[in-house]
Structure formats: C-alpha cells, structure tokens
Amino acid sequence: MKKINIAISSCLAGNQVRYDGGHKRSKYCLDVMSDWFEYLPICPEMGVGMPTPRPPIRLVNQGDKITVKMVDDPSVDFTQELSGYAKAILPKIRDVSGYIVIRNSPSCGMERVKVYHENGNPSNISSSGIYTGELMRLRPELPIEEEGRLQDPKLRENFINRVFAYNEWQNSVLKSPSIKVLIDFHSRYKYLIMAHSYKAYKELGQLVANDGSKSLPKVIADYEMLLMTSLKKVASSKNHTNTLYHIFGYLKKDLSTEAKQEVINVIEQYRKGIVTLIVPITLLNHYMKQFGSDYINNQAYLNPHPIELGLRNYL
C-alpha cells in the first residue's frame, strides 16, 4: 500500500526547531502511524526566518484582532509573516491528505491557545495559532488535528477516518472528475457519512442526484466541503448503531434465524457499551464475505482504515 502524504509540525517529527532549540517528537506519529503515512515536516516559525533557539512568542489580544508578538519585546510582531506563510505553503501541501500540528503553539496550535493582554496578563479567551488558523481558513476541507488530541480514541479514529476518506477523494474524484466517479465515491462512502451525520447523508445524496442546475465543478466543490465538514463531527454510538442496523438489513434474507439473532445481540451489546465497535463490525464483515453483494462489501464504513491501527477497539 502506498503511504498517504500528510503534513506535520516539524518539531513533532523530531526536528530541533522549537524556540528552546528542542523538539516534541511524537512516538505515536512516528512509531505507529508511519507505516501508513509519509510525513512532510513544516515549521512556520523557521519558515519566516526565525532562528532556533529564539525568543518565545505569544498571542496578544488587541481588541479587534489577535496578533502574535515576541514576549520580551512586544514591538516585534510576526502576525503578517505567519499568516503570509500559510498562503505561501499552499502549493507545497496541495496533495497532502491531512495535517498534524503541535498544541498550545501561538503559530501552530489548532485551538485553545492562550491569549494575553497587551500588558502581558493572561486574558480569558483562547484562539488558534496564527499560521494554523489561516491555514484552516484557506483549506477548510483539509483534515487538521493536534497531536495531543490524538490521545483521545474517538478523536484519533475520527482524524484518521478523514485522512483516508480525503485521500481517496483526491485520488478518485479530484483526479478524474466526472459524475460517474462522484456517484461511485458516494455509493462507497454513504454509510460512513451516515454514521457521522444523517442530515449530511441525505443532503449529499441530493447533491449527487443533481438536476442539472449546478455545473459539475460546483457540485464537486459543494460535495467536498459538506463531506469533510460532516466527517469532522465525531460519530456517536447512537449513529453507529443506526448504521450497523442499516448494513445488517442487506443480510436479513440470507441469514438463519440464529445468525440474525446473533448479529442483533452483538449490535445491542455495542449500543449498551458492553463491547467495542470492532465486535459488531467483525461479525458483519464475516457474514458479508459469505452473503454480501459487491455494493455492500465495498462500503468504506466496514473498513475505513487499516485494521492494524486498532482504532475501533476503543469505540
């Protein structure tokens, strides 16, 4: 399997680019996920010419805007440089399928970065880092996550789901745009979408069934945005249960009474929190191999990412 290209904060890749001359090497990213991901390390602070080691910077609330300034000399402002670097980096990350950033960074943090008053006192607000905030504005469809949040099983599975889905979107619909390719993609991903948002599942279906009022580029652009926005929402156990029953519906004609009851029991055990998601998924995959059609066997929901990652063992 060809590795998926994703960007990563350079310090997380083990590079000594931090303000103190150190790094924040991520064992999970480099020792676990590296079998599937090819990393593109980026440090926006180094990218705008800041040395390492260097004086620290922080976010400053100036009333109508959030800026990033040097802690020891607030007259030194890097806001324009860092937001400009986000624009400049776009061609380099055009083909990446995700981005992992370092938390609490005034340049790279995704959310909840501490903001200070101009007098140096902490404010009661937080924000995204200047670089990552601008990047999310420019590329809202791109899966972005903080390394620290990957310790949460649900957020970890959600991010990797989005990366694999977006990579397939890039390599199918964006590479060979046509209504047939779009329909094929939607047919494969409809139940994964349902698990994240039933509303988006309905809306995306309507979008694919275009009445001709929208051009193909417009349909694709709208689909991409709604797809990635809906997948960003963490799938609830209630939605998973609903999706599992929908998929089970394709087996009802072929399974024995005992087998049907076995599947129902396992889905209900998942719904009640007795077993993890991998249990009903494994059972459904077992019966799908025997009785499932090509359509249902091809559903991304059943195998959205390599099973070796063990992501559904905790959901």
Image (spheres, helix red, strand yellow):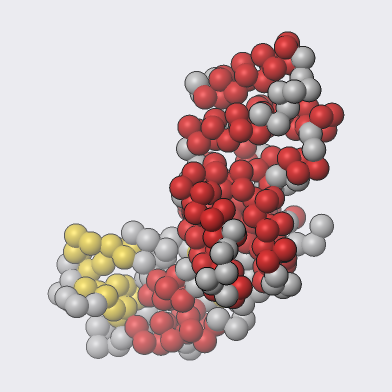
From this view, report whether residue 308 is shown above or below residue 49.
above
The number of numbered badges drawn on the structure is: 0
From this view, report whether residue 189 is shown above or below residue 290.
below
| Image location (x, y in percent) of residue 157 | 57, 46
Which residue is painted at 42% across and 63% down in the image?
Answer: 110
From this view, report whether residue 282 is shown above or below residue 69.
above
The outermost residue toward the top is 258
Q: Nearer the viewer, residue 137 or 25?
A: 137
Which residue is painted at 57% across and 63% down in the image?
Answer: 210
Is 85 on the left-hand or right-hand side of 94?
left
Asked if residue 85 can be seen in this view, the reply is: yes
| Image location (x, y in percent) of residue 127 | 31, 65
The outermost residue toward the right is 290
Which residue is painted at 48% across and 80% down in the image?
Answer: 86
| Image location (x, y in percent) of residue 268 | 56, 20
Asked if residue 224 can be seen in this view, the reply is: no
| Image location (x, y in percent) of residue 160 | 61, 52
In which quadrant is the C terminus drawn? Answer: top right
In which quadrant is the N terminus drawn? Answer: bottom right
Q: Nearer the viewer, residue 257 or 309?
A: 257
Is 221 on the left-hand or right-hand side of 297?
left
Which residue is painted at 55% across and 44% down in the image?
Answer: 194
